[in-house]
Image: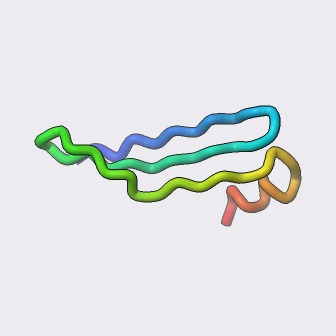
Amino acid sequence: MKQPAGIDILKDGVHACLKEQSDDGRVKIKRSRSFSNDYEGFKGVLD
């Protein structure tokens, strides 16, 4: 099983996603979150 993660950093925000890929190739999104691209948003990434 693989657990790929992705993060997109944009001017106005940050988007993060954690997926789970089974051995047969099926992909399931385990969690995704969006944060503002400022100090408060960065603090949220650490939570």
**Does 11 appear above or below 40?**
above
Q: Nearer the viewer, residue 9 or 12?
A: 12
Tell whether 35 sits left or right of 24.
right
Residue in the picture at 65% in, 52% down: 34
> Residue at 31% across / 51% down in the picture?
28
Q: Tell me which residue sits at (62%, 35%) in the image.
A: 8
Reply above or below: 22 against 33.
Answer: above
* Quarter of the image that includes the C terminus: bottom right
Where residue 45 sits, quadrant-wise, is bottom right
Q: Residue furthest front?
A: 12
Identify the coloring.
rainbow
In the image, farthest residue toward the bottom: 47
* Direction from residue 23 to residue 34 in the image, left or right: right
Where, by quadrant of the figure, is residue 11 drawn? top right
Q: Position of residue 17 (x, y in %)?
A: 50, 47
Image position, residue 18 (x, y; %): 45, 50
Q: Nearer the viewer, residue 17 or 42?
A: 17
Q: What residue occupies the far right of the structure in this picture?
A: 39
Q: How many marks?
A: 0
